[in-house]
Each structure stands twice: as structure tokens, then as C-alpha cells.
Image (cartoon, helix red, strand yellow):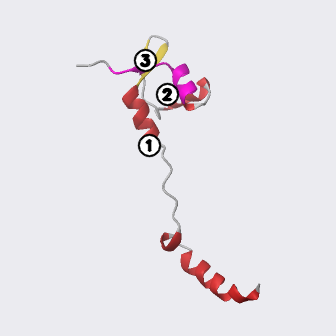
Amino acid sequence: MTIPALYTPEEIAEKLKTTRRTVYRWLTSGKLRGLRAGDTWRIAEQDLMAFLESRKAPAPRVGPKHPDYKRWLAYFQRNQGRE
């Protein structure tokens, strides 16, 4: 068994370019999993990666996949010769 890399909240804040307070808020709310040892927190690398994966934004819907595509297409076709 290998010991995973553990980070402090301060190290996570520095890596993610956020504040230490935000990292502590994620930990106490359960959004970011961490290990508590006394009054200190440690975050395993796999928990950090799972947290980042869960926060990914969905891919933007463009083109025919967008719900308003037909409406936009009709608008631009109507107004094509007006300029």
C-alpha cells in the first residue's frame, strides 16, 4: 500500500488560486473530502482530483445542438439582405 500525497488547505488554496478560507468552507460543507487530524486538515490528491472533476463546467452547446438554434437560424435568414 502506498501513502497518497497529502496537502494542507493552504497548499490547495495556493494551487487553485483561491483563499484558505474558501478551502476550509469546502471542507466543512463536505464539497471537498479531507482528513482531520486534531485541529488540522489534510487533503489526499485523489480527493482533490475528484473535487476538481465534479466542478467541471459542461461543454457549451453550440450549433444545431443549442435549443434556440432553429429560431436564430430563421432570424438570420430573414434579416440577411437588410444590411
Disc 2 marks which residue? Answer: 27
Of labels 1 and 2, the one closer to you: 1
Q: Secondary structure at mark 1?
A: helix
Q: Earlier in the sequence, mark 1 or mark 3?
A: 3
The amino acid marked with disc number 3 is Arg
Report the residue at 50% width, 32% height from top.
29
Q: Position of residue 78 (x, y in %)?
A: 66, 88
The amino acid marked with disc number 1 is Ser
Q: Earlier in the sequence, mark 3 or mark 2?
A: 2
Q: Is residue 56 magenta?
A: no
What separation in Å lies between label 3 and label 2 (alpha carbons)?
Answer: 10 Å
Of labels 1 and 3, the one closer to you: 1
| Quarter of the figure that contains the N terminus | top left
The 10 Å Cα crowd at callout 3, few under 14, some 14 to 19, many 20 or more, is few
The 10 Å Cα crowd at callout 2, few under 14, some 14 to 19, many 20 or more, is some
Along the line of sight, which residue is nearer the eye, 19 or 80?
A: 80
Point out the residue furthest to the right here. Answer: 83
Along the line of sight, which residue is nearer the eye, 41 or 68?
A: 68
In the image, is 80 to the left or to the right of 43?
right
Q: What stretch of residues is rendered in magenta? A: 4-15
| Quarter of the figure that contains the C terminus | bottom right
Disc 1 marks which residue? Answer: 54
Q: Position of residue 20 (x, y in %)?
A: 59, 24
Q: Position of residue 48 (x, y in %)?
A: 43, 31
In the image, is 4 to the left or to the right of 9?
left
